[in-house]
Image (cartoon, grey):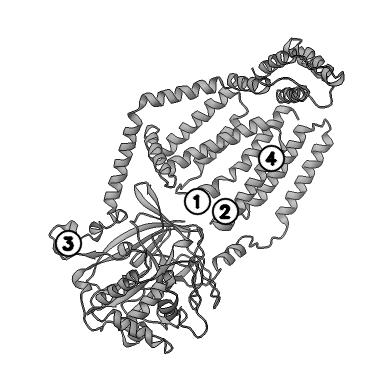
Amino acid sequence: MTTWVKRIVYTALAAYLLSFWVEPIVGSTTFDVNWPFMFLLLVPMFASLLPWYGFITVVVFNFFVVLYVYHGSVLDWFGLWLNDLSGVLSGALPEEAIFFSAMALIGVLFAILVGRTYPSYGFVLGMIVSTLGLMAYFDTWTLYDGEGKIVLAILASLFLLFVTDLAKRPSKSLVRYVSIALLASVVLALASVAPTIEGDWSDRLTTSFQNAGNDEGSGSGRVGYGVNDEQLGGPFEQDDGIVFIARGVPARYWRIESKEIYTGKGWVESPVLDSEYNRGQLVDQAVDTTPEQALLRFDRRQTFVPYGGEYPQATETDNGTEFRVGNIEEPFPNETIHIRPSGKIVFDNDGQTTPQTIQLRYSVPSFTEEQLALNEPVTTLTEEERQAYLQLPESLPDRVRDLSADITSDSETPYDQAQAVQAYFQSGDFQYNTEDVAVPEEDTDYVDQFLFDTLIGYCDNFSTSAAVLLRASGVPTRWVKGFTMGDARGIIQGEEEYTVRNRHAHSWVEYFVEGAGWVPLEATISFSDANLLQVETEDEANADDPAANDPQASQNEEPTNRPQEDLALDDVTSGEAATENWNMPVWGWIVIVFTVAVLVWNRKSIERLVMMLWWTRRPLNENRLVAMHRYLVKRLRGAGFKVDGRTPSELAAEVDAYYESTEMTRLTRLFEQSIYAEKTPNSKYKEYWKIMIRRIMS
């Protein structure tokens, strides 16, 4: 096997290992295809076999061809890239332009490593560990399934180690190759016919992590969204794990379910309730609603579907099969989904999970001031429902009821009572804290402890206390769980995108107003109603302009609540501004590109100059002499000379014969005299050393 063939095989196996990076990494982004990154990562690897000028030509040509095929334009990309870069410098997450360029840079860097280190056990082992580690990480914490691919990666790793060994210790015997080939064939044959055990090499870890703090009666706090709420209290552990990414809507709370029965320690579901205000419906038919559509991409498959309003409808985008959920149960591909009276979307089979990507449609209510000011007797709810939504445990201390009466004494309507409770938390001595949060003792009420003893807590403390205070004043209330809007990622393909993490798990309150329906209330201090409740003023509700009837058009309280049309317009404007920024300082970019080109063209001369200054700036002594000679021998080995197993004189003779010179022999003679004859190092050694370094690096 010739050196050239070994190098090709070595590079091909390294490229094959690198290809395992594409699916898990790209799967965590907004890109829908993998092929551009296969070209960006793998083409430079094979181009590393070419001379440096060929390598640069192939890499640049490949980048722009892939960019043109994927994006459809090259010039527009520079504006997007500058716009993305300015966002990254401002603290935003990178978008497609920067990510695309970063992956191309990774491919170039790996290609340079392959070319510079061949053959290197260090590079190979680092490549193997990083590839297998990356696959294991993404398989454990994301939707990526590496169960079958991990075997291929391990086999490729073993063959890469074998090729590295051959390159370092060449053997002329064919027995070694034949034995390795036979062994590999036997292993592959046995692996293909052997019985398999259904593995669960990631779910145990993630299940235990996701269920942390959610065991019944644990009282140890929460890690993200949990199912069991029977025992509230304890610290809320901040976890940055991604739950889902939402695109296409302004900042919005994400509802999952509500619970009705307060036990004194936490919340449980009530018996099945079935009125027109259940199964996903939140508001009265007289309330205006605005349809919204969001693309949800789950980091891991979940047993729940979050939505931003009422009447959730969804379209599975994994395979194009559509399903919808509303007031009735409808079939889902391969299983049945239901909407519980709490509004939670669940699957017929336990453990059934969401598709990876869902196109979700729902309606967002927008209340008028007149609707919220209603104070009609509650007739829409059944008696069973009224009892459930006004339920309080007999063990609730009287001082909680007395406090409720004091807070709402001047309030006439349910809306006024809710605002009074909210203002009580805002104006009191309450503190928001996720760590130093007490767990009630066996004979202590959760709400009573928070309101009168600790006054420290997070969303569960505030929302549960608000629900109990409103119920004590006669307002039907339920406790709601879900997520806040998440972290803004910026404008992606003309639409806002938010990353919702475990730490965004949240709880709030919905109270009932006859004639309006369920109205959300944010009771937690330091949180705002702006992303939860939309209220039209009387002028907006009566305006003749059709645009004024759009609830989204009145969302001027926060920049993130503007209409999608404005967001798209802003995106176009920012893109035009970025293009202008690209065109204005043309001379500056020309200077930068020219400077980089000059540096690349003269990189070897610059490297030689740096080496000369580094090694020859100090006085020559025995230690310095030995170090310089070792570096020279290292350079000779990198240039292809056989160094191991040869005397210095033999190596010098071969080098001088190759370069048609005598400097290496003279240099070696001076080195041996200084080391073995203990003579003072001759200053001419530096001169000969410089000559040899120039020749080797030319």
Tag 2: residue type? Phe
* Marks 4,3: beta carbons within 8 A: no
User: Crowding at label 1, few (<14), some or many (≥20) Cα neighbours within 10 Å?
Assistant: some
Give the answer, above or below, for where 645 lies relative to 485. above
Tag 1: residue type? Ser
Residue 124's tag is: 4
- Which is more N-terminal, label 3 or label 2? 2
Residue at the disc numbered 1:
28
Residue at the disc numbered 3:
540
As measured in the structure, the alpha-carbon distance from the residue carrying label 1 to the one carrying label 2 is 9 Å
Secondary structure of the residue carrying tag 2 is helix
User: Crowding at label 3, few (<14), some or many (≥20) Cα neighbours within 10 Å?
Assistant: some
Secondary structure of the residue carrying tag 1 is loop
Q: State the image quarter where residue 18 is shown.
A: top right
Q: Is residue 589 left or right of residue 602?
A: left
Q: Is residue 70 left or right of residue 181?
A: left
Q: Nearer the viewer, residue 52 or 73?
A: 52
